[in-house]
Amino acid sequence: MQSLRSNSSVIALKGVGPALQKKLERLNLYQIDDLFFFLPLRYEDRTKFSEISSLKIGSRNLVTGKILNSEITFRGRRVLLVNIKDESDEMTLRFFHFSNQQKLQFKEDSYINFFGEVRKGAFGLEMIHPEYQITGKNQNLSTNNSLTPIYPSTDGVQQGRLRSLTNQALNIMHAAPPKELLPKEIYKKFQLPPLAKAINFLHRPPPEANLDEIISGTHPFQQRLVFEELLAHYLSLRKLRNLTVSESAKALKQGKEEIKNFTSELPFKLTEAQMRVTKDILVDLEKPHPMMRLIQGDVGSGKTIVAAIACIKAIASGYQAAIMAPTEILAEQHWHSFSNWFETLSIKPTWLSGSQKVASRRESLDSITSGNAKLVIGTHALFQEGFNFKNLGLVVIDEQHRFGVHQRMALRNKGVSGKNKPHQLVMTATPIPRTLAMAAYADLDTSIIDELPPNRQPISTIAVPETRRNEVIKRVSSACSRGQQAYWVCPLIEESEMLNCQAAEASYKILSEALPNFRIGMVHGRMKPAQKEKAMKDFKDGLTNVLVATTVIEVGVDIPNASLMIIENAERMGLSQLHQLRGRVGRGKVKSHCVLLYKLPLGKIAKERLAVLRDTNDGFIVAQRDLELRGPGEILGSKQTGLPQYRIADIGRDGYLMPKVQIAAESILKNHSSYVPKIIRRWLGETSRYEKV
Ligand code: ADP
Ligand code: MG
């Protein structure tokens, strides 16, 4: 043991052979000190016995008592029941799988210690399949002297084995504590406790430790490690950003006149915020390094026009620009808007989507590769196929909900001709709370459009149980008779697109019957692109009064005359999604309304969600509340693609640390840059996952 060092391979530990070593490597555990940072997910308290009368349903406890009797019953299935008594009360242990041998062990009057989750049974408290130890005539009152850590479960490696490995690792750590990788002034400034102390505590918390604090993740020792983990991720994103700066791109220097003409011909004046963000972009584009800029702006803040200006600069400078939209409907809409806007510039956008007919697709590809296509608009198809742009200068990714670091990395290398990378502009559909943005997007430059175009009236939102559907239909009717238009969004059925479409068809039928004087349109995911396009166009042109839709209209759709939005089964949708949907109205001069129809009974979280929407129209507040209610994974997309996967940090809980993390990171980058790779390796593994893509 003495000769082992913290950077020795795990194979040096007792009990580790080649097979286990492989499994450990899959957990990113290569060296002994990797185990230091392999932290428990939770803890169990086996440091003391609990009296039966003190047990709370749902908690996990250690109990000692005497076996009263045991019996096998046959109610539908064979069940072994063991009744236990201690000084305070009685309870039952229930086994569904057991051998006759096992049944015989439970001898009357023997002492037994057992651990498990307390449940409410038919006749009192129960535990199902507890861990247990029968000690016979003698009661054994020895307990663990620290809380029992439960490690992230892993296929084929038992908790007992993980405890033994971490025990060995901790012993080695006592002799040779891990290097402190943060500069001294940071420890002082943020009062961080020593690393070894924190690690030891978290692997083996003493019985007197404040378990509530540990469970909630707010113990100072946890926060010490959280700080370093957030720092590691932040540094790795900053490294990526530096990488971008070292890459080359074409400097796009032309377009001043064109942009001036373009903006002067718009029917409105850009807001201050739009001008500020536009300027950020135009400055970036003139640099010989690829822009990586994220535009955040609430629904309806006018991001599209900003993107259009960027495209003009790219095209005027002799390069191609491409706009990628997340849905076909939105891509279509952009195609129409840009066709209008760019008519005076004699630029006709080229269309590219997955469902395009072969001949038209070939035509598009030809002009993309030849460079005739100056502006290309489409869906993901833009970046999926094996073709190259002639000279792509700018990529705009619009309304990107899910934009994880991996996707960013993958996109960086798409459409690249020669050594020059295109400039990238990403526009998010969902505003992101500031601390979350700091953690997730440190590799990007960000600009925020924090102002809505003038004269927008706030949307008034109400929640109504679906039992009052008829009143809501009346409301639609009276809005339509005033010449206004309405969206009717059908329930989201996550299991199947097919069911979503059926729901839309059912609503379409009901509304057509209930509103015979008005024309009802419908759009859903299984319609042909041409049908979808026609439905959208008819609604835009005012030929239909009501558009029944699935959530395909969630992002981007811009039809200013629509002023009423009905959302069915609103209780099932997330806050950000509801905010997006609601954002389809409130774009014109008429006051808009949103009705959230919900099914009773309403759960607590659903209630809170609906209340948030009722109370605010501000997407940043909605996002902050969404973060608190659902956690960051939901806001940034799935756990794998959105935020970094943290081991111990929880950005919803720990986001408040980000401003400090940022200060520490800048100081380390400036004064102690040799520590950067070490910190990253410690938390992100052998090869930082961001670089592997
Ligand atoms: P989003 O940020 O949600 O993508 P859009 O770009 O679709 O918003 O713009 C929403 C609507 O506001 C569009 O109809 C657009 O023409 C209009 N708009 C954009 N900028 C302004 C402005 N400065 N003044 C008035 N209307 C504007
Ligand atoms: Mg948009």
Image (spheres, helix red, strand yellow):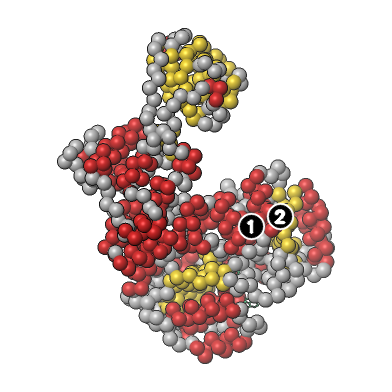
Figure quadrant, ligand 1: bottom right
Tell me residue 656's x, y (percent): 49, 57
Q: Are marks 1 and 2 in contact (CB under 8 Å)?
A: yes
Left/right placement of residue 491 relative to residue 641 reads right
Q: Residue shown at 55%/54% (left/top)?
A: 627
Quadrant in which the C terminus is drawn: bottom left
Looking at marks 1 and 2 on the same chain, the residue that comes earlier in the sequence is marked by: 1
Q: Disc 1 to disc 2, how far (Cα)? A: 9 Å
- Is residue 639 in sight in this rendering? yes
Q: Which mark is residue 596?
A: 2
Q: Within 10 angstroms of label 2, few (less than 14), some, or many (20 or more) residues?
A: many
Tell me which amino acid carries mark 2.
Leu
Q: Which mark is residue 570?
A: none
Closest to the observer: 220 or 250?
220
State whether residue 77 is above or below residue 233: above
Tell me residue 42's x, y (percent): 44, 39
User: Element type at marker 1?
Assistant: helix
State whether residue 466 is above or below residue 529: above
Find residue 190 and report its image quarter: bottom left
Residue labelled with disc 1? 578
Q: Residue shown at 81%/54% (left/top)?
A: 471
Tell me which amino acid carries mark 1.
Leu
